[in-house]
Amino acid sequence: MNNIGIILCKQEKYDEALDYHQRALEVQEKHCSSCQNEISNSLNHIGDVLIEQKKYDEALKFYQRALETQEKYYRNSHVEIAATLDNLGTTCRLQKRFIEAIEYHPKALEIQEKYYPSNCVIISNTMNRIGHVLYNERKYDEAIHYYRRALSMQEKSYPDGHIETSHTLNSIGSALYEQKKFDEALQFYQKSLTIQETYHELLHIDIARSLNSIGNVLYSQEKYDEAIHFYQRSLDIREKFNRFSDIGIATVLGNIGSALYEQRKYDEAIDFHLRALTFREKFDTTNHDDIVDSLRNIANTLSEQEKYNEAMEFQQRALTTNLDVQVDVAATNLTNVTAQV
């Protein structure tokens, strides 16, 4: 049943996948209570599906149960424990609980370095995860240190290039970008793009992301025509292969709008920002921050055209959206506090 659940998860049929994994767990706990390894695997599989559903609190509980089961089953450190520690760390990072995340991943790394060869992909993946946490904490030098260690391993394992190598190159580029080291960032993004286009031409989303990242660097360097060129290439790919499911479409539309704004091409800028807003309000309704950004971008552009009444309408919509979010957050916080009284 777990194998079916794994396939369904890859097909993004998460509710069905969850059902199969839960049924597997139920059978294991009822008929094979001594099968602790199989039980911990099912718990991890359930956590994996919940992660895809962005139900991080629930996922964390299943990963913790898996870890408790494994620590009873394996008297000494074991690679299965390391995998669960990585899962816990990743979940905490997604919840922005970085202090906890940075505790889990090094524990996993210590076990992995004990049992796996020095250039093992599993080790490089954990190094990347540590880098991601440090990146989220804005500790960019430390993040780059781990990314470079991961890259060194990957280049030895995959001398001709690999998708994992391209991801690490992108991560280094992003950290350098945040440090405003734009020329260096550009080099890493371009290396990543070269690998993706040469060896993994079917990985459309990865290519689109790299193109957008290159556009961001060029935008920051005030090379707006070049930035728009890369943004447009990214948009073309996203619209061709993921027309109705790719939230990144709205991001790229907004980026093109911002570049056109800097060129004082206000009519064109508004058109792209409106398209971004329409996409977000239709396909990404819970992402209020990005909706507010689109509304404000439109308002600012209208102000530059001295269309102040229209600009005011969009600013008011942005304010209303923000207030609604604050009210929802306050209500949730109040409910949580009341429940504890």
Image (cartoon, rainbow, N blue to C red):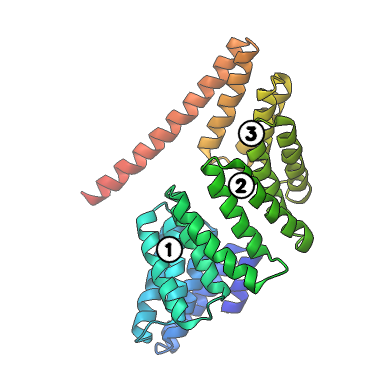
Closer-to-camera residue (33/228): 228
Quarter of the rendering occupied by the N terminus: bottom right
Above-or-below relation of 283 to 314: below
**Can you identify the residue that label 1 sits on?**
89
Question: Which residue type carries mark 1?
Answer: Gly
**If you read the primary sequence from the N terminus, does the residue marked by circle 1 or circle 2 appear first?**
1
Question: Which residue type carries mark 3?
Answer: Gln
At horizontal 55% and vertical 47% (from top left) the residue drawn is: 176
Q: Secondary structure at mark 1?
A: helix
**Can you identify the residue that label 3 sits on?**
221
At horizontal 47% and vertical 83% (from top left) the residue drawn is: 115
How crowded is the residue under tag 1: few (<14 C-alpha within 10 Å), some, or many (20+)?
many
**Can you identify the residue that label 2 sits on?**
185
Mark 2 and mark 3 in contact (Cβ < 8 Å)? no
Question: Which residue type carries mark 2?
Answer: Ala
Q: Is residue 313 left or right of residue 233?
A: left
Above-or-below relation of 134 to 106: above
How far apart, in angstroms, are the residues tagged by discs 1 and 3? 35 Å
**If you read the primary sequence from the N terminus, does the residue marked by circle 3 or circle 2 appear first?**
2
Q: Secondary structure at mark 3?
A: loop
Mark 1 or 3, closer to the camera: 3
